[in-house]
Image (cartoon, rainbow, N blue to C red):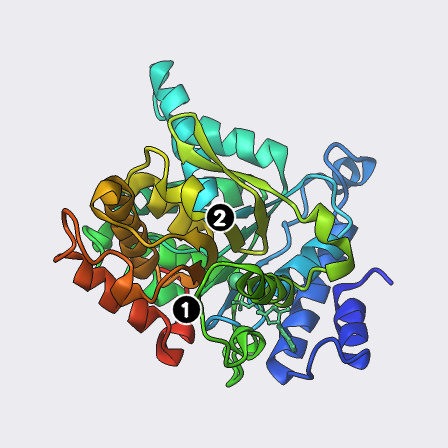
Amino acid sequence: MNSVLARYQALVANDELRPDAEQEAAARRLDVLQQELEATPSRGSVLWRALGRQPDPPRGVYLWGDVGRGKSMLMDLFYDAVDVRRKRRVHFAEFMLDVHARIAVERRKEAGDPIPPVAEALAEEARLLAFDEMMVTNSPDAMILSRLFTELLAKRVTVVTTSNRPPRDLYLNGLNREHFLPFIGLIEQRLDVLPLNGPVDYRLDRLGRMDTWLVPNGAAATEKLSAAFFRLTDYPVEDRAHVPTADLDLGGGRTLHVPKALKGVAVFSFKRLCGEARGAADYLAVARRFHTVILVGIPKMGPENRNEAARFVSLIDALYEYKVKLLAAADAEPADLYPRGDGSFEFARTVSRIEEMRSEAYLAEGHGG
Ligand SMILES: Nc1ncnc2c1ncn2[C@@H]1O[C@H](COP(=O)(O)OP(=O)(O)O)[C@@H](O)[C@H]1O
Ligand SMILES: [Mg+2]
């Protein structure tokens, strides 16, 4: 069973997914794309030469909708099903880091416009690019996207992407947005834009009514958080010893090891995230990359922990800014975490953010800046 539609329908038939008309429609569209991609002859094939020109590359798909609508689930089903050798699935924020790194290398060669050779290399590596969570939050990205994607599409790359917003709302209120508008035009013209925005937030469903701040640290909290991790990622509990890890690219050649990372959900210990020298940029990288962070081992802090407390404030700011969902185990309620010490007065703002992050309204919001 190799088609994305057949796989989707089987999951519904087995009660692993609830029937959802918009998802079914998206699965049908992705199924067509799968057939087109699989029918496209490989480069240099006799058929191309016989035709005298290259056939048009298949049109891509842009899936958008609120959090928990099944965008990533469908894209992953499609990506796994499609029989294409040169394919790449990447979180959009990580892709942009990679692009900027490649552009920097090209610039050093002082050989003119760096974008065409970067696009050329990317197109050489993958004729199918699948992006999860396309969002544009900074001006350096916004300034190059239109030219980069024009080149990629011209080089016959097919793009599939998910996003929390329709194309017209990307980089909304961004600096110099007028330079970004051609990118929106390009997406609307060259990709099929499909809403996946039904009434049900399946992720929220899976969180249930669980309290997301568990006190105290210990076996009971660990058990609840671990169950939430498996529910959110559809990972088989029997296989708990083999949950994938990740090395998050922090830029500048640095990485952060994530001991458990799957489908946008990451697990960290407080010690790892706030006990070592880290700064806001690292926390923003975490916040961009993961829609849900499970943080365990948050201690009660005193005056001697002012560095940890300051880093924790900066972590919460980043998670909050990107509307990341936080599931935590701590030795105290937020208001009692850091009662005395440098910055404990300002800590009140962090406490109120954490309280808001526990609310159902916050949990229902989409990931993104
Ligand atoms: N039709 C469905 N029935 C039950 N669960 C679903 C359905 N669609 C998606 N899910 C689950 O809901 C969660 C959120 O889906 P996901 O694809 O991550 O959403 P999005 O990318 O739109 O935020 C995942 O665990 C996914 O497997
Ligand atoms: Mg998603």
Question: Does residue 253 appear in this view?
Answer: yes
Looking at the image, is mark 1 or mark 2 nearer the viewer? Answer: 2
Q: Give the CA distance from mark 1 to mark 2.
A: 21 Å
Which of the two residues, 187 or 27, is positioned nearer the viewer here?
Answer: 27
The outermost residue toward the right is 1
Q: How many marks?
A: 2
- Amino acid type shown at disc 1: Gly
Numbered disc 2: secondary structure: strand
Tell me where residue 262 appears, x and y as whole percent: 60, 52
Q: Which label is found at residue 366?
A: 1
Report the residue at 68% width, 64% height from top.
234
- Amino acid type shown at disc 2: Phe
Tell me where residue 47 appears, x and y as whole percent: 80, 40
Could you tell whether 175 is left or right of 33 in the image? left
- Residue on which disc 2 sits: 268
Tell me where residue 93 appears, x and y as whole percent: 43, 46
Tell me where residue 358 appears, x and y as whole percent: 37, 72
